[in-house]
Structures are given as C-alpha cells and as structure tokens.
Image: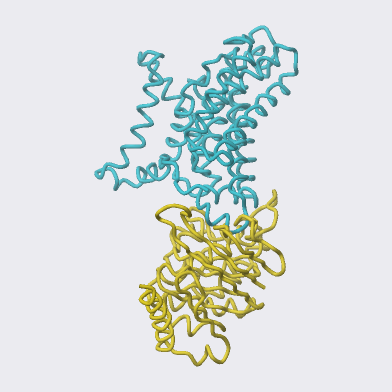
Amino acid sequence: MLDLTSVSKTFFAGTVNERRALTDVSLSLAPAEFTTVIGSNGAGKSTLLNLVAGALLPDSGTIGIDGADVTRLPDHRRAAYIGRVFQDPMAGTATTMTIEENLSIALARGRGRGLRMGVTRAKRAFFEAELASLELGLERRLKTVVGLLSGGQRQALSLLMATFSEPKILLLDEHTAALDPSRAELVTRLTSEAVERHHLTTLMVTHNMDQALRLGTRLIMMHEGRIVVDVAGEQKQRATVADLLGAFEKVKGAGFDDRTLLQ
Amino acid sequence: MIGAVELGLIYAVMALGVYLTFRILDFPDLTVDGSFTTGGATAAILIVGGVNPVLATAAGGAAGLVAGTITGLLHTKGGINPLLAGILTQVGLYSINLRIMDGANVPLLRYDTLLTPLRDNDLLGTAASIGIFAALVLAIKVVMDWFLNTDLGLAVQATGDNQGMIRSFGVSTHATKILGLALSNGLVALCGALIAQYQGFADISMGIGLIIAGLASVILGQALIPPRIVVIATFAVILGSILYRVAIQIALQVGLDPNDMKLVSAVLVVLALVLPKWSVLRRVPSIRSIRRSAAVEPTAGDR
C-alpha cells in the first residue's frame, strides 16, 4: 500500500549545519498493516512522516501509494490518499469553525469542492452517528466552535476527521504526546478502534515504547536516519520494552565502536 | 443624516469585501485603496463611452476581480508578504487608473447612470432610496453567506483559520487565497463603481485611505454584535459601515474640518485596536470581542 524506495533527505545541504535526516530508507507497508515507529530525537521519524505526507520532498528515492508514484506531488494533492493527525491538538482542526463545519471539510477529503452546501441534513445525521462512537457527547454539540473543546476532545475529533473518509494511509505523529495520561489512553483506544474498523494502513510515530508495543502489527526503530529494527507478527507481540532498549543500546554501541575503531 | 445612512449602505459593499480578506482569510489586503478607484474609473469611462450603466458597473466589479487575483498571485506564487503584495498592486493600479480615465477624473453629471432614475425622481436622500440600497446590500450579504457555507466557502474559511489543516484535507491554499482576494476586491471595485455614480464623478484619489474605513466598519460592527457565525458577522459589518458614516457625519456637523476626517478615522481604528489590550478594559466582554476581531497581524508560516 505504501512503498518507500531508497529515500534520502538532507537538510541545509552544503552548509555547516548540514544534517542527514534520512539515509537510503526503504519501507513497504502491506494493506491494513499498522506500523509503529520509535527512535530517539533526531532519528528521522518525523522526517519520514513528513516525506510520506508530502510536507517535505525527498532528495532521492521514490514514494508510492497504492501503486501510484506520489514522490513529487505536493501535500494537498496527496491528501486524497492520506489522513493525518498531528501532535498539537490545535493543528488538525479549524478552531473558529464549528464541529459540523470541520467534519464537512474532512468528509470532502481529496474531492473537488464546489458550490454545494457544506453542511446538509443528511451529513449532519452521519456526523452525529460518527461522533457518538467517540462517546464524548460531541454528537450533541455539532454547532459548537472547536476552539471551545478540550485538547483531548479536539484530538479525538481530529482522529475522526482523519479516518472516517477512509484514506489509504493514516499518519499519526505522536498524536497522544500532548495529552494528559487519561486522555492519551482514550485517544489511543479510539485510534485502534478506528484503524480496525476502516482497515487503515497506518504509520504511527511515538515516543512511548509501551504504546508502540501494545498497538499495531509491526514495529520499526529508527536511529540516525536509518531503520535499525523491524519486527512484525509473533515476534512483535512477544517483544518487551527491555528488548527494545537492548536493541537500541546495541545499535548505539555499534556506532560508537565504529567511531573508536576509526580513531 | 439620511445621506450618511445611504453612503453607509453603499460603502457596506466595500466593507463586506474587507471583511472577507481581513477576518475570513486573515489577510491584511491593502489592494483595496487601488481596486476601489479601478472599479469607479472603469465604470465611469464606460458610461461616458455610452455603455449601459448596468454593464459598466459589472465591468467595474470585474476589474476588481482581476486586481485581487494579481495580489493573490504575488503573494502565493511570488512568495511576497501579504502587506507588501497588496501595496505593490495598489501602487501599480494608481498608474493603471490614470490610464483608464485618461486623466485624474471623469465627470458623470450629464450621463445616464444607475442612479439617474433615483435622482430624476428626487428619491435620493429619502426612505425609498435607503430601501433600494438596503435591498442591494442585503442581496450581496445573502449571496456571501451562502457562498461561505458551501464546500468551497468552508475551505476558504478554513484557509484563514488553519492552513496546515485545510491542506491536509486536499485543498490548495494558494487557490483559496487567490479566490478570496479576487472576490473581496471584486466587491470593493463594485462599490467604487456605485460610489462614482452616486457622487457623479470618478477621481484618482477616491480610494485613498479607504482600507481604514473598511476596517473601522468591520471592527465597529463586530464590537456591537459579537460575531459567532457568518450570517451574523456579515450583518454586523453592514451595521458597522452605516454607523461609521453616521459618526463621520456627526463629526462634520460639530464643526470638524473635512480634511481632518482621515486622521479621525485612523485614530478611531488605532483606539479600537489598542484599547482592548489595556488590562482595565479587558474584563468588559464586548471589548474582548473587539480584540478578537481586531487581531490583524499577518500569520507566519505561509507556504
């Protein structure tokens, strides 16, 4: 469903600040595969997500979605295939607009927008049913301005907006990191429900190893712009946080050894 | 005073255009000063040339669409800061307006205009003319309300609210900004065409400082009626435009020099922007709403 082939990205190339964010990364996700991505700061997780979303364009390599080459498509043209939830609960919604207006915008994902009414009675009934599935009581607040919602409510709404039009790919960028533990738990539960219900091919970046292990069917660990661990299926189900830390230490140690050898 | 209400209603067309850029798109568009004159000049020269006044007025509005599109292209494709993009178009239009009129002004007094029937029947300055102008403005308001609630209109609204969000749902913010700027300046130029016919001439300086009048109308109206939804916000803008013209009229009647009016307008807008930031006044709810509606700093992070 998603195919990255030898993708590299360097920031500030040719300056003293040059930083290789991704080096020759290849990754292929099968339909309905739910992959979690972990790694330390600067490992290239966000760059990976931004390249898939089209917010950044790669220096080399290709990106394909469902067989179509999207490597050079700008983000808004790729949006037909990609639903996205950001870390910042403010980022995924229009705060001065109402819940039903936000949902209407999301429902029209990737389609031409013309002069039909944005919110219709039929859509409203659909929105009520979808919001009810969040169990936050938002189905009774369709005309509430999104700016009045709490961070958790807003992130739950963002998740619904990203998933209910059934995009081919769902990108989650540490989308529970800015929430308090109980709200993070709620959004995590809603995430697995939505992914399961719509059979979404998902790429989720997280800092939380426990979450990365609990959610999804596959796990990759990134370090210095490369994928260094890639486990799936049975192996992933059995993995523990200690295993991941061990693997991480090994990768880091290897890098260190290489450097000491070179001296 | 009836004259002031009349003027307020006609200028409300311009204020609705300013509302579209300043509040909906969050884009401080200074094209207005130029495109208003462009609308007046285009309509005037066509009327003098014997064109039907309805067509001439429509052509004036169309000229504004083009002006707004140019500002939009400068900003989106050219990557120019919103304020500068507007100023560049405005300055360029000054020369173009002189070319359109082939001089600094075009008198219309001896020609048939849209307002000739009203003028000939002595209806200007009466309840009848106010009714006609009010119907015209309300018709434009209703169309604008409808547009902003369509799929496309919601995308334009979201562009002014959260660009990253609306792009992530497949909308080109370049397209929505250009569209919003074109429609806004179309309304402004349409207003210019009407004003030229109302005052009986088009003049190169008719648009100077107009953006302040537009802003004052938007801020004044929204201070009185806190806008929750578009339908109410557009109504507040029209009311603001009328109140602004009435306030100017009162200032003139108490003996202020007409030449000082631009300064008075500028000071009014400054007060409306600054007062709500003073902590003593921040607790007054209606003033808080002015502050929200007066946040005109251009947004960063434009792609």
Q: Is residue B51 left or right of residue B156?
A: right
Total marks in image = 0
Residue A255 is drawn in which quadrant? bottom left
Residue A89 is drawn in which quadrant? bottom left
Q: Position of residue A239 (x, y in %)?
A: 48, 90
Q: Position of residue A79 (x, y in %)?
A: 62, 60
Q: Position of residue A263 (x, y in %)?
A: 35, 72
In the image as oriented, which residue stretches furthest toward the left? B280
At horizontal 52% and vertical 28% (from top left) the residue drawn is: B88
Q: Is residue B46 visible in the rendered structure shown here?
A: yes
Q: Is residue B296 above or below residue A92?
A: above
Q: Position of residue B39 (x, y in %)?
A: 62, 23
Q: Is residue B224 left or right of residue A203?
A: left
Q: Which chain is yellow?
A: A
Q: Is residue A166 visible in the rendered structure shown here?
A: no
Find chain B in the image and tell me its colour. cyan
In the image as oriented, which residue stretches furthest toward the top? B110
